[in-house]
Image: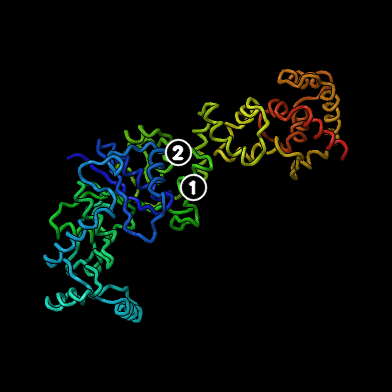
């Protein structure tokens, strides 16, 4: 049987790291096994729907080079691919379950449910609906339906025995049925719950393997009871390990769970994001860490998924991203950085060749696109601010003498080209006996405000003669 994997996001906003990681793992497993990748939009949570979120979902998948084989954009024969267009299907299957006595109408009001919750709190026990409406007579059910009483449809779960299934990551999972609640399948507004719609859709769409987070390990038992009640074959399951923030807590917006578009707009490359997220809970047999999408598909092995939680480490993401930045051509590097420079500084009248040289100067240091603003600030700010290390270095009397020499050489230069700057430094070395650290460090510190930085000659050239002289003057008049 051909592998069919679905990614089923809810259109509630930007796609966050945790959700995208689940999509990536599903995609890699699917494509490694020559399967089809299906996107189904789960929009039954009407209150949380966000306009244009569906467009953002598909834009994210496209940027991440994840080819969609079926969706509402390119439908197959198992549509609709949007859950809100499948309401009649869910109702039909819910009524079928009622007829089989595998589900029942529940007319309990919110006040009645709160009374049960209060009793559970008083007993210091978890609330589980007591199933009282299952005992209603056929006559009472018909009467209440006829007069239009609000109801939900609940799954009837037998409380004896143990539910068992195999997960491809965690192995044999056992859940006592007594801890499973008679979950709601169809809400009073006619919309299905997430749990119910997933089972119906996955079966009708021929989904062979379900990939999701391990927070669903226990509740999957309820899904399986639904499969069994309908007589549907169960899919295979891959439950992914939890992702923790750097604070050791579950990843959330508060502790680092940025959306993909947040990262992308900060200047992280989509291929680097995919590469990094694939390493969150999975590793290759040879511990290689840099992969193209095709390479990931080729080597992906579900047996290499860890059971232990993974930690979202921004520094590791930046390390991976920097690897990709180092390989960019100048036009790609410009596209990654120029918008950030233009947002921070007025570059409207700056020569494009100069900008390209500036951007190229930081290519080996850059970890993400927006970082260019901070790294290159010395070229745009009027004054240099020295840190304590620089101030201490500048107190050396020898430094003042060296900088006076530089000032006299530079003031007389008619040509401030790369070649001329190199010649000036060499002349100072030969004619004044200045060498080593003292030859380069004083001019670097005064010109850039940095003890260590990008290549000196290129830095002086990009600063330009006037700015270098101004900074030398400012220093020399202060000492």
Q: Is residue 120 above or below residue 430?
A: below
Q: x%, y% of residue 400?
A: 85, 33
Q: Nearer the viewer, residue 419 or 63?
A: 63
Which residue is found at the position 28% from the left and 46% from the top? 6
Name the disc covering residue 265, or none.
Answer: none
Q: Earlier in the sequence, mark 1 or mark 2?
A: 2
Q: Is residue 14 above or below residue 48?
A: above
Name the disc covering residue 313, or none.
Answer: 1
**The C terminus lies in quadrant:** top right
Q: x%, y% of residue 427?
A: 80, 18
Q: x%, y% of residue 445?
A: 75, 35
206 with respect to 11 (left or right):
left
Which residue is found at the position 74% from the left and 38% from the top? 449
Q: Nearer the viewer, residue 396 or 457?
A: 457
Marks 1/2: CA–CA distance: 17 Å
Q: Mark 1: which secondary structure?
A: loop
Please tell me how crowded label 1 is: few (under 14), some (14-19), or many (20+) other residues with Cα within 10 Å. some
The quarter holding residue 129 reads: bottom left
Mark 2 highlights which residue? 270
Q: Is residue 175 above or below residue 238?
A: below
Please tell me how crowded label 2 is: few (under 14), some (14-19), or many (20+) other residues with Cα within 10 Å. many
Which residue is found at the position 43% from the left and 57% from the top? 250
**The N terminus lies in quadrant:** top left
Q: x%, y% of residue 84?
A: 29, 55
Q: Mark 2: which secondary structure?
A: helix
Q: Is residue 235 above or below residue 329?
A: below
């Amino acid at each position: 049987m051909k592998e069919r994997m679905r990614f089923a996001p809810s259109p509630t906003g930007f796609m966050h790291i945790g959700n995208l990681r689940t999509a990536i793992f599903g995609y890699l497993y699917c494509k490694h096994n020559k399967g089809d990748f299906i996107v189904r939009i789960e929009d039954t949570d009407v209150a949380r729907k966000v306009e244009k979120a569906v467009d953002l979902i598909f834009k994210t998948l496209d940027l991440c080079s994840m080819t969609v084989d079926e969706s509402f954009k390119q439908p197959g024969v198992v549509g609709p691919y949007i859950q809100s267009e499948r309401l009649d299907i869910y109702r039909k299957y819910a009524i079928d379950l009622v007829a089989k006595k595998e589900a029942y109408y529940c007319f309990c009001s919110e006040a009645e449910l709160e009374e049960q919750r209060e009793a559970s709190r008083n007993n210091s026990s978890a609330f589980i609906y007591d199933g009282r409406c299952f005992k209603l007579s056929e006559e009472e059910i018909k009467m209440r339906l006829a007069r239009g009483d609000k109801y939900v449809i609940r799954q009837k779960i037998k409380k004896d025995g143990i539910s068992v299934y195999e997960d491809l990551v965690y192995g044999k999972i056992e859940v006592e049925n007594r801890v499973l609640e008679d979950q709601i399948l169809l809400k009073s507004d006619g919309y299905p719950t997430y749990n119910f719609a997933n089972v119906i859709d996955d079966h009708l769409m021929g989904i062979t393997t379900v990939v999701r987070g391990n927070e669903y390990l226990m509740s999957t038992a309820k899904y399986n009871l639904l499969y069994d009640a309908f007589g549907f074959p169960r899919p295979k399951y891959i439950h992914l390990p939890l992702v923790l923030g750097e604070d050791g807590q579950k990843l959330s917006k508060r502790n680092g769970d940025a959306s993909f578009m947040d990262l992308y707009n900060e200047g992280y490359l989509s291929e680097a994001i995919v590469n990094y997220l694939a390493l969150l809970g999975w590793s290759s047999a040879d511990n290689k860490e840099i992969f193209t999408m095709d390479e990931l598909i080729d080597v992906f092995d579900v047996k290499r998924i860890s059971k232990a939680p993974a930690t979202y480490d921004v520094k590791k993401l930046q390390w991976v991203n920097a690897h990709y930045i180092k390989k960019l051509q100048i036009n790609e590097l410009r596209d990654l950085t120029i918008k950030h420079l233009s947002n921070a500084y007025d570059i409207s009248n700056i020569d494009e060749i100069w900008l390209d040289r500036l951007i190229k100067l930081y290519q080996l240091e850059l970890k993400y696109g927006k970082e260019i603003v901070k790294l290159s600030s010395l070229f745009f700010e009027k004054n240099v601010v020295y840190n304590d290390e620089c101030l201490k270095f500048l107190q050396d009397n020898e430094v003042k003498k060296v900088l006076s020499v530089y000032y006299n050489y530079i003031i007389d230069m008619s040509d401030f080209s790369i070649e001329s700057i190199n010649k000036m430094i060499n002349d100072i070395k030969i004619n004044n006996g200045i060498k080593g650290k003292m030859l380069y460090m004083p001019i670097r510190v005064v010109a850039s405000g940095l003890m260590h930085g990008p290549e000196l000659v290129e830095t002086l050239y990009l600063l330009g003669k006037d700015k270098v002289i101004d900074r030398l003057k400012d220093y020399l008049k202060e000492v």
